[in-house]
Amino acid sequence: MSHDAPLVTGAAGFIGFHVTQRLLTAGRKVVGLDVVNNYYDPSLKEARLDILKRDPNFSFVKLNLTDREGIKALFSEYRFPVVVHLAAQAGVRYSLDHPHAYVDANLEGFINVLEGCRHNECRHLLFASSSSVYGSNTKLPFSVHDNVDHPISLYAASKKANELMAHAYSHLYGIPATGLRFFTVYGPWGRPDMAMFIFAKAILSGSPIKLFNNGNMRRDFTYVDDVSEAIVRLMKRPPQGEPVLGTVAPDPSSSKAPWKIYNVGNNNPEELSRVVFLLEKKFGRTATKEMLPMQPGDVPATYADIDDLVQDIGFRPSTTIENGIERFVKWYREYHNV
């Protein structure tokens, strides 16, 4: 494969699958990496991979990011001009009981990717961060210009660490790096551990839906096609580094180094109870709801300020929650033969 193919890590994952598909549709060659672990049903990951593998421009590498020598060899073989790093150990609640999984995948795995970029002249590294880095921030909407030093889960702390590690590498080695703080991504081929999937499954099986904070949680649900569109646009825009005006308090979202952070969200938070209502309407069934208090590590609301994204790439998400849910339900019915 030519040395102009980007690397997408987590290609069998939810967002990685959609980004890879979009690049392939545009006629690009893509190398996809995934370990296909069992954090959730691997058959869903295999089904995504089967679709990608039908395209002759797709090359799949099954490899664990913690395999230092394997990652080193992969990078020196392909010398990826662009790396879209979406592989990670995800999930806030899972991090309460499985902390080491986050250190392995999100810290050790990320340093191996950074080293690969450093030694092989990568021209742009885009990496997944998360809206969870805003932690106990209460000022809404969440802005990339706000300080994010109070994570309330290990998952969030590992994502904040990724932003800092990437900054160090941008500063030391001039690697252009763009961090993407994703806000509750949903859509076809979504993750079974996320709200939309959990709600759909519960509605169809008649099991109760657990609504934390008594259903008053608000999430900035962002449709996956909007997310992959933003990523593909940003791939062509490596950060240049910005002159720092007055160094007393540098802006948390940018740097003199070629490093930048963006919120990738819908800029329109929805009550979880309304999301359940829209799913009920589409499935034609009523859900049993169980109202519960807040859980540790959870935040009552997420809401993305996306001004920087609009300003830099002229991008604004265009999928309403009604349309997004309709497309998700259509896929869910087909995939599960409902």
Image: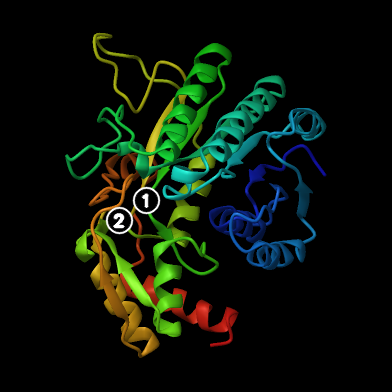
- Residue beneath label 1, please? 183
Q: Which mark is residue 220?
A: 2
Foreground: 298 or 25?
298
Q: Is residue 161 above or below residue 212?
A: above
Give the CA distance from mark 2 to mark 1.
6 Å
Q: Is residue 51 above or below residue 75?
A: below
Instruction: Say what secondary structure mark 1 lies in.
Output: loop
Q: Residues within 10 Å of mark 1 (few under 14, many from 20)?
A: many
Q: How far across and how far down the image is residue 162, in percent?
A: 49, 30
| In the image: residue 72, left or right of residue 322 | right
Does residue 327 appear in the picture of this structure? no
Residue 143's quadrant in the figure? Answer: top left
Residue lying furthest left in this view? 139
Q: How far across and how far down the image is residue 34, in percent?
A: 69, 48
Instruction: Say what secondary structure mark 2 lies in.
Output: loop
| In the image: residue 214, left or right of residue 185 | left
Tags 2 and 1 touching, CB below 8 Å = yes
| In the image: residue 182, left or right of residue 38 | left
* Residue type (three-letter) at the residue carrying disc 1: Phe
Q: How far across and how far down the image is residue 229, in percent?
A: 48, 54
* Residue type (three-letter) at the residue carrying disc 2: Asp
Residue 63's quadrant in the figure? Answer: top right
Does residue 319 appear in the picture of this structure? yes
Q: Residue at x 21, y 45 (%)?
A: 141
Residue 25's quadrant in the figure? Answer: bottom right
Q: Residues within 10 Å of mark 2 (few under 14, many from 20)?
A: many
Foreground: 210 or 198?
210
Q: How far across and how far down the image is residue 157, in percent?
A: 41, 32
Q: Residue at x 82, y 32 (%)?
A: 77
Foreground: 76 or 155?
155
